[in-house]
Image (tube, grey):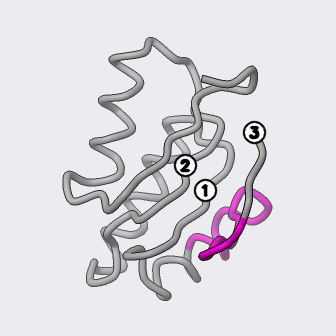
Amino acid sequence: RTPGGLVVVLGCSHAGVVNTLRHLKRLTGADSIHAVIGGMHLEKASMNRVHLTIRAMNELGVEKVIPVHCTGFAACAEMARLLGDRFVSGGAGDVFVF
């Protein structure tokens, strides 16, 4: 928990990033999710699934999305296009301060 809301750090979201975020909101009672960083397991997902994931992140109030690892280039590119400033490119060695 941070003053800005939850910061969720993912490994590789085999259970689904949306399922994980919904579960965390239920567990914590948080109103918003400040940031999600990590592998979103979308590398082999259809573009429809990527769009559904982005829509769900919007509905869940995710303020920053930092996809890495198994998210995949196509999903990252679509997130960048649709999320604008809410998308942050991340990679090995990057440091984020919340």
Badges 1 and 2: C-beta atoms under 8 Å apart? yes
Badges 2 and 3: C-beta atoms under 8 Å apart? no
Q: Count neighbours of disc 1 (C-alpha within 10 A) and say few if under 14, some if 14 to 19, many if 20 or more.
A: many
Find numbered disc 1 in the image and state the secondary structure of the residue it sits on: strand
Task: Indicate yes or no whether the magenta region holds residue 87.
Answer: yes
Badges 1 and 3: C-beta atoms under 8 Å apart? no
Find numbered disc 2 in the image and state the secondary structure of the residue it sits on: strand
Task: Indicate yes or no whether the magenta region holds residue 36.
Answer: no
Give the residues drawn in magenta, as a range: 79-94
Label 1 and label 2: CA atoms lie apart by 5 Å
Residue 5, image quadrant: top right
Residue 77 as seen in the image, left or right of residue 20: right
Residue bearing the label numbered 2: 36
* Residue at image location 46% in from the left, 78% down from the top: 75
The type of residue carrying mark 1 is: Val
The type of residue carrying mark 2 is: Val
* Residue at image location 27% in from the left, 42% down from the top: 19
Label 1 and label 3: CA atoms lie apart by 13 Å
Q: Residue furthest top?
A: 29
Residue 78 as seen in the image, left or right of residue 81: left
Find numbered disc 3 in the image and state the secondary structure of the residue it sits on: loop
Instruction: State which tag comes first along the sequence, 2 or 3.
Output: 2
Residue bearing the label numbered 3: 98
Q: Count neighbours of disc 2 (C-alpha within 10 A) and say few if under 14, some if 14 to 19, many if 20 or more.
A: many
Picture coordinates of residue 45 (x, y %)? 28, 78
Picture coordinates of residue 83 (x, y %)? 67, 62
Please name which of the two marks, 2 or 3, marks the residue nearer to the observer. Answer: 3
Label 2 and label 3: CA atoms lie apart by 11 Å
Residue bearing the label numbered 1: 65
Note whether 81 is above or below 16 in the view shown: below
